[in-house]
Image (cartoon, rainbow, N blue to C red):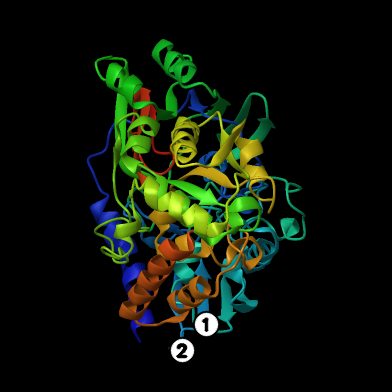
Protein backbone atom coordinates (compact mmCIF):
# COMPACT_ATOMS: atom_id res chain seq x y z
CA UNK A 1 0.00 0.00 0.00
CA UNK A 2 1.15 3.50 -0.74
CA UNK A 3 0.52 4.63 2.83
CA UNK A 4 2.79 1.93 4.20
CA UNK A 5 5.57 2.79 1.77
CA UNK A 6 5.20 6.43 2.69
CA UNK A 7 5.60 5.66 6.37
CA UNK A 8 8.60 3.46 5.69
CA UNK A 9 10.19 6.37 3.86
CA UNK A 10 9.52 8.58 6.85
CA UNK A 11 10.99 6.07 9.24
CA UNK A 12 13.95 5.50 6.96
CA UNK A 13 14.56 9.22 7.04
CA UNK A 14 15.66 8.97 10.66
CA UNK A 15 18.85 7.18 9.73
CA UNK A 16 19.35 9.40 6.71
CA UNK A 17 18.87 12.51 8.78
CA UNK A 18 21.58 11.40 11.15
CA UNK A 19 24.02 11.26 8.27
CA UNK A 20 22.86 14.46 6.61
CA UNK A 21 22.96 16.45 9.81
CA UNK A 22 26.47 15.33 10.73
CA UNK A 23 29.02 18.13 10.79
CA UNK A 24 32.45 18.79 12.26
CA UNK A 25 32.11 19.24 16.00
CA UNK A 26 32.59 22.67 17.51
CA UNK A 27 33.88 23.31 21.01
CA UNK A 28 30.57 23.21 22.84
CA UNK A 29 30.53 24.75 26.30
CA UNK A 30 28.09 23.97 29.06
CA UNK A 31 26.81 26.73 31.33
CA UNK A 32 25.47 30.24 31.32
CA UNK A 33 22.03 31.79 31.42
CA UNK A 34 20.58 32.85 28.08
CA UNK A 35 17.77 35.37 27.73
CA UNK A 36 15.56 35.37 24.64
CA UNK A 37 13.50 38.46 23.86
CA UNK A 38 9.95 37.56 22.76
CA UNK A 39 7.22 39.75 21.39
CA UNK A 40 4.62 39.00 24.07
CA UNK A 41 3.62 36.76 26.93
CA UNK A 42 2.04 33.45 25.90
CA UNK A 43 -1.76 33.36 26.29
CA UNK A 44 -1.26 30.07 28.18
CA UNK A 45 1.58 27.72 29.12
CA UNK A 46 -0.58 24.60 28.68
CA UNK A 47 1.26 23.45 25.57
CA UNK A 48 -1.41 21.11 24.21
CA UNK A 49 -4.20 23.68 24.23
CA UNK A 50 -2.93 26.58 22.12
CA UNK A 51 -1.64 27.26 18.62
CA UNK A 52 -0.18 30.65 19.63
CA UNK A 53 3.33 31.04 18.20
CA UNK A 54 4.83 32.59 21.32
CA UNK A 55 3.51 29.67 23.40
CA UNK A 56 4.99 26.88 21.26
CA UNK A 57 8.28 28.79 20.94
CA UNK A 58 8.63 28.17 24.66
CA UNK A 59 6.81 24.87 25.18
CA UNK A 60 8.77 22.91 22.57
CA UNK A 61 11.79 23.27 24.84
CA UNK A 62 10.12 21.32 27.65
CA UNK A 63 7.64 18.97 25.94
CA UNK A 64 8.20 16.49 23.12
CA UNK A 65 6.01 14.51 20.74
CA UNK A 66 5.91 10.96 19.35
CA UNK A 67 6.90 12.26 15.92
CA UNK A 68 8.30 15.71 15.15
CA UNK A 69 9.23 17.69 12.04
CA UNK A 70 12.75 17.66 10.65
CA UNK A 71 14.54 20.65 9.11
CA UNK A 72 12.55 20.24 5.87
CA UNK A 73 9.22 19.87 7.66
CA UNK A 74 8.95 16.09 7.24
CA UNK A 75 7.73 13.89 10.14
CA UNK A 76 10.42 11.78 11.80
CA UNK A 77 10.42 9.79 15.07
CA UNK A 78 11.05 11.64 18.33
CA UNK A 79 9.69 9.95 21.48
CA UNK A 80 8.63 7.04 19.28
CA UNK A 81 11.31 4.69 18.02
CA UNK A 82 9.18 3.67 15.04
CA UNK A 83 5.60 3.23 13.85
CA UNK A 84 4.18 0.25 11.95
CA UNK A 85 1.00 0.84 9.92
CA UNK A 86 -1.44 -1.92 9.00
CA UNK A 87 -2.22 -2.72 5.36
CA UNK A 88 -5.66 -1.11 5.64
CA UNK A 89 -4.15 2.12 6.96
CA UNK A 90 -6.20 2.06 10.17
CA UNK A 91 -3.87 0.65 12.85
CA UNK A 92 -0.75 2.54 13.97
CA UNK A 93 1.55 0.63 16.32
CA UNK A 94 4.04 2.96 18.01
CA UNK A 95 7.13 1.46 19.61
CA UNK A 96 8.44 3.92 22.20
CA UNK A 97 12.03 4.75 23.06
CA UNK A 98 13.03 3.20 26.35
CA UNK A 99 14.69 5.07 29.20
CA UNK A 100 13.03 8.42 28.46
CA UNK A 101 12.46 10.28 31.73
CA UNK A 102 9.91 12.92 32.61
CA UNK A 103 11.05 15.93 34.58
CA UNK A 104 9.68 14.28 37.75
CA UNK A 105 12.04 11.32 37.22
CA UNK A 106 9.33 8.90 36.10
CA UNK A 107 10.00 6.81 32.97
CA UNK A 108 7.70 7.38 30.00
CA UNK A 109 5.52 4.38 29.15
CA UNK A 110 2.60 3.51 26.91
CA UNK A 111 0.13 4.54 29.63
CA UNK A 112 1.49 8.10 29.53
CA UNK A 113 1.10 8.24 25.76
CA UNK A 114 -2.46 6.96 25.96
CA UNK A 115 -3.43 9.53 28.62
CA UNK A 116 -1.74 12.38 26.73
CA UNK A 117 -3.46 11.53 23.46
CA UNK A 118 -6.84 11.22 25.14
CA UNK A 119 -6.41 14.57 26.89
CA UNK A 120 -5.45 16.16 23.59
CA UNK A 121 -8.68 14.92 22.06
CA UNK A 122 -10.56 16.88 24.73
CA UNK A 123 -8.56 20.11 25.09
CA UNK A 124 -6.01 20.16 22.27
CA UNK A 125 -5.50 23.22 20.13
CA UNK A 126 -5.94 20.91 17.12
CA UNK A 127 -8.20 18.38 18.87
CA UNK A 128 -9.89 17.51 15.57
CA UNK A 129 -6.91 15.33 14.63
CA UNK A 130 -8.07 12.86 17.31
CA UNK A 131 -11.65 12.54 16.04
CA UNK A 132 -10.85 9.63 13.70
CA UNK A 133 -9.34 7.65 16.59
CA UNK A 134 -11.42 4.65 17.65
CA UNK A 135 -9.14 3.33 20.39
CA UNK A 136 -5.77 3.83 22.06
CA UNK A 137 -4.42 0.70 23.73
CA UNK A 138 -1.10 0.05 25.51
CA UNK A 139 0.01 -3.28 23.99
CA UNK A 140 2.97 -3.46 26.38
CA UNK A 141 5.04 -1.11 28.53
CA UNK A 142 6.64 0.48 25.46
CA UNK A 143 4.11 -0.19 22.69
CA UNK A 144 0.93 1.80 21.97
CA UNK A 145 -1.65 0.73 19.40
CA UNK A 146 -3.87 3.44 17.89
CA UNK A 147 -6.82 2.25 15.81
CA UNK A 148 -8.63 4.69 13.52
CA UNK A 149 -12.27 4.48 12.46
CA UNK A 150 -11.26 5.15 8.87
CA UNK A 151 -7.85 5.51 7.18
CA UNK A 152 -6.27 8.95 7.66
CA UNK A 153 -3.18 9.18 5.44
CA UNK A 154 -2.09 12.39 7.15
CA UNK A 155 -2.27 11.05 10.71
CA UNK A 156 1.50 11.01 11.28
CA UNK A 157 1.75 14.49 9.73
CA UNK A 158 -0.92 15.72 12.12
CA UNK A 159 0.43 14.30 15.37
CA UNK A 160 3.93 15.53 14.49
CA UNK A 161 2.78 19.12 14.10
CA UNK A 162 4.45 21.74 16.30
CA UNK A 163 1.47 24.08 15.84
CA UNK A 164 -0.43 23.02 18.98
CA UNK A 165 1.89 20.18 19.95
CA UNK A 166 0.55 16.83 21.12
CA UNK A 167 3.07 16.81 23.93
CA UNK A 168 3.51 13.65 25.99
CA UNK A 169 3.05 14.15 29.73
CA UNK A 170 2.69 11.76 32.68
CA UNK A 171 -0.58 9.84 32.84
CA UNK A 172 -1.38 11.74 36.04
CA UNK A 173 -1.89 14.87 33.91
CA UNK A 174 -4.38 13.20 31.58
CA UNK A 175 -7.58 14.17 33.38
CA UNK A 176 -6.59 17.77 34.05
CA UNK A 177 -8.56 20.66 32.57
CA UNK A 178 -7.03 23.42 30.48
CA UNK A 179 -4.35 25.43 32.29
CA UNK A 180 -4.33 23.05 35.28
CA UNK A 181 -1.28 20.98 34.34
CA UNK A 182 1.93 20.66 36.34
CA UNK A 183 4.19 21.39 33.32
CA UNK A 184 5.98 18.04 33.34
CA UNK A 185 7.50 16.96 30.03
CA UNK A 186 10.49 15.09 28.62
CA UNK A 187 12.34 17.94 26.88
CA UNK A 188 15.96 19.08 27.30
CA UNK A 189 14.77 21.98 29.45
CA UNK A 190 12.17 21.90 32.21
CA UNK A 191 9.55 24.46 33.13
CA UNK A 192 10.26 26.53 36.25
CA UNK A 193 8.02 29.61 36.37
CA UNK A 194 5.74 31.90 34.38
CA UNK A 195 5.31 35.56 35.28
CA UNK A 196 2.78 36.98 32.77
CA UNK A 197 4.12 40.52 33.05
CA UNK A 198 7.77 39.48 32.75
CA UNK A 199 9.03 36.09 31.59
CA UNK A 200 8.98 32.31 31.40
CA UNK A 201 11.95 30.56 33.02
CA UNK A 202 13.25 27.12 32.02
CA UNK A 203 16.27 25.25 33.34
CA UNK A 204 18.38 22.45 31.90
CA UNK A 205 17.01 18.97 32.63
CA UNK A 206 20.08 16.97 33.63
CA UNK A 207 18.10 13.72 33.43
CA UNK A 208 17.29 14.28 29.76
CA UNK A 209 17.59 11.24 27.47
CA UNK A 210 18.92 12.33 24.05
CA UNK A 211 17.69 10.39 21.02
CA UNK A 212 20.80 8.44 20.01
CA UNK A 213 19.23 7.34 16.70
CA UNK A 214 20.42 10.71 15.39
CA UNK A 215 23.83 12.35 15.20
CA UNK A 216 22.56 15.82 16.15
CA UNK A 217 19.46 18.02 16.15
CA UNK A 218 17.11 17.83 13.19
CA UNK A 219 14.24 20.29 13.24
CA UNK A 220 12.24 19.61 16.40
CA UNK A 221 13.62 16.09 16.70
CA UNK A 222 17.11 14.63 16.47
CA UNK A 223 19.69 14.40 19.22
CA UNK A 224 19.15 17.44 21.44
CA UNK A 225 21.69 18.72 23.93
CA UNK A 226 20.99 21.47 26.46
CA UNK A 227 24.12 23.54 27.16
CA UNK A 228 22.67 26.59 28.91
CA UNK A 229 21.91 26.37 32.63
CA UNK A 230 18.70 28.34 32.15
CA UNK A 231 16.69 29.82 29.31
CA UNK A 232 14.56 32.87 30.08
CA UNK A 233 11.96 34.02 27.56
CA UNK A 234 11.49 37.69 28.42
CA UNK A 235 8.44 39.52 27.09
CA UNK A 236 9.55 42.72 25.30
CA UNK A 237 6.63 43.85 23.10
CA UNK A 238 8.27 46.88 21.48
CA UNK A 239 10.61 46.00 18.61
CA UNK A 240 13.00 48.86 19.25
CA UNK A 241 13.37 47.83 22.88
CA UNK A 242 14.14 44.23 21.87
CA UNK A 243 16.80 45.42 19.43
CA UNK A 244 18.34 47.76 22.00
CA UNK A 245 18.48 44.98 24.59
CA UNK A 246 20.21 42.73 22.06
CA UNK A 247 22.74 45.45 21.16
CA UNK A 248 23.67 46.07 24.79
CA UNK A 249 23.85 42.37 25.62
CA UNK A 250 20.97 42.56 28.11
CA UNK A 251 19.44 39.72 26.10
CA UNK A 252 21.27 37.26 23.88
CA UNK A 253 18.67 36.28 21.28
CA UNK A 254 15.44 37.55 19.71
CA UNK A 255 12.77 35.59 17.89
CA UNK A 256 11.90 38.51 15.61
CA UNK A 257 13.62 41.68 14.40
CA UNK A 258 12.01 44.29 12.11
CA UNK A 259 13.73 44.28 8.68
CA UNK A 260 15.07 47.87 8.98
CA UNK A 261 16.60 47.01 12.35
CA UNK A 262 18.08 43.79 10.98
CA UNK A 263 19.60 45.71 8.06
CA UNK A 264 21.16 48.20 10.49
CA UNK A 265 22.54 45.48 12.77
CA UNK A 266 24.17 43.49 9.97
CA UNK A 267 27.25 45.68 10.37
CA UNK A 268 27.37 45.20 14.16
CA UNK A 269 30.16 42.73 14.94
CA UNK A 270 28.48 41.82 18.24
CA UNK A 271 25.29 40.56 16.58
CA UNK A 272 24.48 37.71 14.19
CA UNK A 273 21.46 38.09 11.87
CA UNK A 274 19.56 35.08 10.50
CA UNK A 275 17.00 35.49 7.66
CA UNK A 276 14.11 33.02 7.28
CA UNK A 277 12.06 33.12 4.04
CA UNK A 278 9.24 32.26 3.63
CA UNK A 279 8.20 32.46 7.23
CA UNK A 280 4.44 32.84 7.14
CA UNK A 281 1.37 33.85 5.20
CA UNK A 282 0.04 37.28 6.07
CA UNK A 283 -3.71 36.74 6.22
CA UNK A 284 -6.96 38.41 7.13
CA UNK A 285 -9.40 35.96 8.70
CA UNK A 286 -13.10 36.74 8.24
CA UNK A 287 -15.99 36.09 10.63
CA UNK A 288 -18.72 34.63 8.42
CA UNK A 289 -21.19 34.29 11.28
CA UNK A 290 -21.71 37.86 12.50
CA UNK A 291 -22.42 41.32 11.13
CA UNK A 292 -21.90 42.40 7.52
CA UNK A 293 -19.27 39.75 6.82
CA UNK A 294 -21.85 37.01 7.36
CA UNK A 295 -22.87 37.93 3.80
CA UNK A 296 -20.71 36.13 1.23
CA UNK A 297 -20.91 39.02 -1.23
CA UNK A 298 -19.52 41.40 1.39
CA UNK A 299 -16.62 38.99 1.92
CA UNK A 300 -16.10 38.87 -1.84
CA UNK A 301 -16.17 42.68 -1.95
CA UNK A 302 -13.41 42.81 0.67
CA UNK A 303 -11.38 40.34 -1.40
CA UNK A 304 -11.94 42.43 -4.56
CA UNK A 305 -10.83 45.65 -2.85
CA UNK A 306 -7.43 44.81 -1.45
CA UNK A 307 -4.15 46.01 -2.92
CA UNK A 308 -1.99 43.24 -1.50
CA UNK A 309 1.32 44.73 -2.60
CA UNK A 310 0.66 47.99 -0.76
CA UNK A 311 -0.32 46.08 2.37
CA UNK A 312 2.67 43.72 2.25
CA UNK A 313 5.22 46.45 1.51
CA UNK A 314 4.18 48.29 4.66
CA UNK A 315 3.29 45.37 6.93
CA UNK A 316 6.49 43.44 6.17
CA UNK A 317 8.75 46.50 5.94
CA UNK A 318 10.05 45.12 2.65
CA UNK A 319 10.64 41.44 3.40
CA UNK A 320 7.80 39.76 1.45
CA UNK A 321 6.67 38.09 -1.75
CA UNK A 322 3.28 38.08 -3.48
CA UNK A 323 1.76 34.60 -3.88
CA UNK A 324 -1.90 33.62 -3.87
CA UNK A 325 -1.74 29.92 -2.97
CA UNK A 326 -2.56 28.39 0.40
CA UNK A 327 0.51 26.13 0.11
CA UNK A 328 4.03 27.29 -0.65
CA UNK A 329 5.17 27.17 -4.30
CA UNK A 330 7.31 24.15 -5.06
CA UNK A 331 5.58 21.88 -2.54
CA UNK A 332 3.48 18.84 -3.43
CA UNK A 333 0.15 20.48 -2.65
CA UNK A 334 0.70 23.87 -4.28
CA UNK A 335 -2.46 24.26 -6.41
CA UNK A 336 -1.00 26.25 -9.29
CA UNK A 337 -3.03 29.17 -10.62
CA UNK A 338 -6.31 28.13 -9.00
CA UNK A 339 -7.89 31.25 -7.50
CA UNK A 340 -5.17 33.55 -8.80
CA UNK A 341 -7.72 35.73 -10.62
CA UNK A 342 -9.24 36.63 -7.24
CA UNK A 343 -5.91 37.63 -5.67
CA UNK A 344 -4.65 41.21 -5.43
CA UNK A 345 -7.55 42.49 -7.54
CA UNK A 346 -7.44 46.17 -6.47
CA UNK A 347 -10.88 46.55 -8.05
CA UNK A 348 -12.93 49.13 -6.14
CA UNK A 349 -15.64 49.21 -8.83
CA UNK A 350 -16.19 45.46 -8.54
CA UNK A 351 -16.23 45.76 -4.76
CA UNK A 352 -18.89 48.48 -4.83
CA UNK A 353 -21.05 46.37 -7.17
CA UNK A 354 -20.79 43.38 -4.83
CA UNK A 355 -21.69 45.58 -1.84
CA UNK A 356 -24.76 46.81 -3.70
CA UNK A 357 -25.80 43.23 -4.49
CA UNK A 358 -25.30 42.35 -0.82
CA UNK A 359 -27.61 45.15 0.30
CA UNK A 360 -24.84 46.66 2.39
CA UNK A 361 -26.03 49.85 4.12
CA UNK A 362 -22.87 50.97 5.88
CA UNK A 363 -23.06 48.60 8.83
CA UNK A 364 -19.91 48.60 10.95
CA UNK A 365 -17.14 46.16 10.09
CA UNK A 366 -14.89 45.56 13.11
CA UNK A 367 -11.25 44.92 12.22
CA UNK A 368 -9.57 43.16 15.15
CA UNK A 369 -5.80 43.43 15.51
CA UNK A 370 -3.05 43.70 18.10
CA UNK A 371 -0.27 46.12 18.91
CA UNK A 372 2.40 43.45 19.53
CA UNK A 373 2.95 42.20 15.98
CA UNK A 374 3.73 44.97 13.52
CA UNK A 375 2.65 42.89 10.53
CA UNK A 376 -0.74 42.33 12.15
CA UNK A 377 -1.24 45.96 13.07
CA UNK A 378 -0.04 47.45 9.79
CA UNK A 379 -2.06 44.96 7.75
CA UNK A 380 -5.18 46.04 9.59
CA UNK A 381 -4.40 49.76 9.28
CA UNK A 382 -3.60 49.71 5.55
CA UNK A 383 -6.38 47.29 4.62
CA UNK A 384 -8.99 49.21 6.60
CA UNK A 385 -8.14 52.40 4.72
CA UNK A 386 -8.48 50.58 1.41
CA UNK A 387 -11.86 49.19 2.48
CA UNK A 388 -13.06 52.62 3.58
CA UNK A 389 -12.24 54.02 0.14
CA UNK A 390 -14.41 51.28 -1.36
CA UNK A 391 -17.35 52.43 0.76
CA UNK A 392 -17.13 50.21 3.83
CA UNK A 393 -17.57 51.43 7.39
CA UNK A 394 -14.54 49.96 9.15
CA UNK A 395 -13.56 50.39 12.80
CA UNK A 396 -10.19 49.22 14.10
CA UNK A 397 -10.17 47.40 17.43
CA UNK A 398 -6.55 47.31 18.63
CA UNK A 399 -5.69 45.22 21.71
CA UNK A 400 -2.67 43.30 22.92
CA UNK A 401 -1.95 39.94 21.29
CA UNK A 402 -3.37 37.59 23.96
CA UNK A 403 -6.61 39.61 24.07
CA UNK A 404 -7.01 39.62 20.28
CA UNK A 405 -6.14 35.93 20.05
CA UNK A 406 -8.86 35.04 22.53
CA UNK A 407 -11.43 37.55 21.22
CA UNK A 408 -11.57 35.93 17.78
CA UNK A 409 -12.63 32.65 19.40
CA UNK A 410 -16.07 34.21 19.92
CA UNK A 411 -18.53 34.16 17.00
CA UNK A 412 -19.47 37.79 17.55
CA UNK A 413 -17.78 41.13 18.20
CA UNK A 414 -15.34 41.05 15.29
CA UNK A 415 -15.49 40.92 11.49
CA UNK A 416 -11.87 40.79 10.32
CA UNK A 417 -8.73 39.60 12.12
CA UNK A 418 -5.15 40.16 10.90
CA UNK A 419 -3.04 37.05 11.44
CA UNK A 420 0.43 35.86 10.49
CA UNK A 421 -0.43 32.29 9.45
CA UNK A 422 2.94 30.64 9.77
CA UNK A 423 3.01 27.17 11.22
CA UNK A 424 -0.02 25.91 9.28
CA UNK A 425 1.38 26.15 5.73
CA UNK A 426 4.69 24.84 7.05
CA UNK A 427 2.88 21.71 8.21
CA UNK A 428 1.23 21.06 4.85
CA UNK A 429 -2.35 21.01 3.59
CA UNK A 430 -4.09 19.17 6.41
CA UNK A 431 -3.82 21.89 9.02
CA UNK A 432 -4.55 24.70 6.56
CA UNK A 433 -7.76 23.02 5.41
CA UNK A 434 -8.68 22.00 8.94
CA UNK A 435 -8.36 25.58 10.18
CA UNK A 436 -11.40 26.46 8.04
CA UNK A 437 -13.34 23.20 8.38
CA UNK A 438 -12.83 20.82 11.29
CA UNK A 439 -11.49 23.17 13.95
CA UNK A 440 -13.49 25.40 16.31
CA UNK A 441 -16.39 23.01 16.69
CA UNK A 442 -16.38 22.05 13.02
CA UNK A 443 -17.10 25.60 11.87
CA UNK A 444 -13.57 26.79 11.24
CA UNK A 445 -11.99 30.08 12.27
CA UNK A 446 -14.80 31.83 10.35
CA UNK A 447 -17.44 30.32 12.71
CA UNK A 448 -19.59 29.07 9.81
CA UNK A 449 -19.24 25.72 8.09
CA UNK A 450 -19.33 25.31 4.32
CA UNK A 451 -20.31 21.92 2.84
CA UNK A 452 -18.00 22.24 -0.17
CA UNK A 453 -14.97 23.09 1.94
CA UNK A 454 -15.87 20.22 4.28
CA UNK A 455 -16.11 17.72 1.40
CA UNK A 456 -12.71 18.76 0.07
CA UNK A 457 -11.22 18.47 3.55
CA UNK A 458 -12.74 15.01 4.01
CA UNK A 459 -11.27 13.82 0.70
CA UNK A 460 -7.89 15.26 1.64
CA UNK A 461 -7.91 13.35 4.92
CA UNK A 462 -9.20 9.99 3.67
CA UNK A 463 -7.80 9.48 0.15
CA UNK A 464 -4.97 6.96 0.11
CA UNK A 465 -3.50 8.09 -3.21
CA UNK A 466 -1.32 11.20 -3.28
CA UNK A 467 -2.84 12.40 -6.55
CA UNK A 468 -6.33 12.24 -5.03
CA UNK A 469 -5.18 14.26 -2.04
CA UNK A 470 -3.56 16.83 -4.34
CA UNK A 471 -6.86 17.17 -6.22
CA UNK A 472 -8.76 17.49 -2.94
CA UNK A 473 -6.62 20.40 -1.83
CA UNK A 474 -6.98 22.04 -5.24
CA UNK A 475 -10.76 21.73 -4.83
CA UNK A 476 -10.44 23.25 -1.36
CA UNK A 477 -8.50 26.24 -2.69
CA UNK A 478 -10.96 26.75 -5.57
CA UNK A 479 -13.90 26.89 -3.17
CA UNK A 480 -11.94 29.03 -0.71
CA UNK A 481 -11.72 31.94 -3.15
CA UNK A 482 -15.49 31.71 -3.70
CA UNK A 483 -16.62 31.33 -0.07
CA UNK A 484 -13.92 33.70 1.28
CA UNK A 485 -13.51 32.66 4.93
CA UNK A 486 -10.20 34.50 4.83
CA UNK A 487 -7.79 36.31 2.55
CA UNK A 488 -4.15 35.57 1.89
CA UNK A 489 -2.32 38.87 1.48
CA UNK A 490 1.18 37.50 0.77
CA UNK A 491 4.25 35.70 2.15
CA UNK A 492 6.25 37.17 5.02
CA UNK A 493 9.92 36.64 5.79
CA UNK A 494 11.47 37.04 9.21
CA UNK A 495 14.80 37.88 10.81
CA UNK A 496 16.05 36.17 13.96
CA UNK A 497 19.21 37.27 15.74
CA UNK A 498 21.63 36.39 18.51
CA UNK A 499 24.65 37.93 20.15
CA UNK A 500 27.87 37.00 18.34
CA UNK A 501 29.01 34.88 21.28
CA UNK A 502 26.08 32.48 20.85
CA UNK A 503 27.50 29.55 18.87
CA UNK A 504 25.63 26.72 17.19
CA UNK A 505 22.34 28.60 16.77
CA UNK A 506 20.24 27.45 13.80
CA UNK A 507 17.34 29.63 12.59
CA UNK A 508 14.00 27.94 12.09
CA UNK A 509 10.33 27.86 13.00
CA UNK A 510 11.17 28.57 16.64
CA UNK A 511 14.28 29.96 18.39
CA UNK A 512 15.69 26.57 19.43
CA UNK A 513 17.94 27.05 22.41
CA UNK A 514 19.22 23.49 22.49
CA UNK A 515 22.50 22.62 20.73
CA UNK A 516 23.77 26.17 21.07
CA UNK A 517 26.04 27.65 23.70
CA UNK A 518 28.14 30.64 24.75
CA UNK A 519 31.63 30.82 23.25
Discs 1, 2 touching: Cβ within 8 Å: yes
Relative height, residue 183 to residue 145 (above, below): above
Residue corresponding to mark 2: 88
Q: Picture coordinates of residue 490 (x, y %)?
A: 35, 45
For the residue pair 232 and 414, the one nearer the viewer reads as 414
**Tag count in the figure?**
2
On-image quarter of the N terminus:
bottom left
Apparent side of residue 188 relative to residue 294 in the rendered image (left or right): left
Q: Which mark is residue 91?
A: 1
Relative height, residue 149 to residue 53 (above, below): below
Q: Picture coordinates of residue 500 (x, y %)?
A: 32, 20
Q: Is residue 101 visible?
A: no
Relative height, residue 122 to residue 423 (above, below): below
For the residue pair 451 and 87, the one nearer the viewer reads as 451
Q: Picture coordinates of residue 316 (x, y %)?
A: 36, 33
| Quadrant of residue 429 within the rendered picture | bottom left
Q: Picture coordinates of residue 412 (x, y %)?
A: 69, 50
Label 1 to label 2, Cα distance in Å?
8 Å
Q: Which element type, helix, strand or loop, lies under badge 2?
A: loop
Assess disc 2: are there few (<14), some (14-19) or many (≥20) residues with their C-alpha within 10 Å of its C-alpha. Answer: few
Apparent side of residue 472 relative to residue 42 in the rendered image (left or right): left
Q: Which mark is residue 246?
A: none
Q: Is residue 407 visible?
A: yes
Q: Which element type, helix, strand or loop, lies under badge 1?
A: strand
Relative height, residue 248 to residue 421 (above, below): above
Assess disc 1: are there few (<14), some (14-19) or many (≥20) residues with their C-alpha within 10 Å of its C-alpha. Answer: many
On-image quarter of the C terminus:
top left
Amino acid sequence: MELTRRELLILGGAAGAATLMSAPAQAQKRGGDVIVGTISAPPTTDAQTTSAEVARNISLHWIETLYARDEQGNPIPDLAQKCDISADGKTYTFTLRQGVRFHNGQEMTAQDVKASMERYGKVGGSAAIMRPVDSITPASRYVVRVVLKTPVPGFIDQISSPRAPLGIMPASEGDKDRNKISHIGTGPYQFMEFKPDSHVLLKRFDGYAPNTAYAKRDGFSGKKTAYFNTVTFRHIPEGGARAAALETGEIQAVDMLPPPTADRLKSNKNVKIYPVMPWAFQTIMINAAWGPTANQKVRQAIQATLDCEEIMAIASEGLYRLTHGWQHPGTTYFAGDIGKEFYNQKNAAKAKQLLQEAGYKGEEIVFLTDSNYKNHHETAVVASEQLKKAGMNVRLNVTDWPTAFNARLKPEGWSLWALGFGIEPYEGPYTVAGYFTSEYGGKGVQHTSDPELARADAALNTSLKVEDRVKAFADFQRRFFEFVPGIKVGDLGRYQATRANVAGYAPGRIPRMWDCWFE
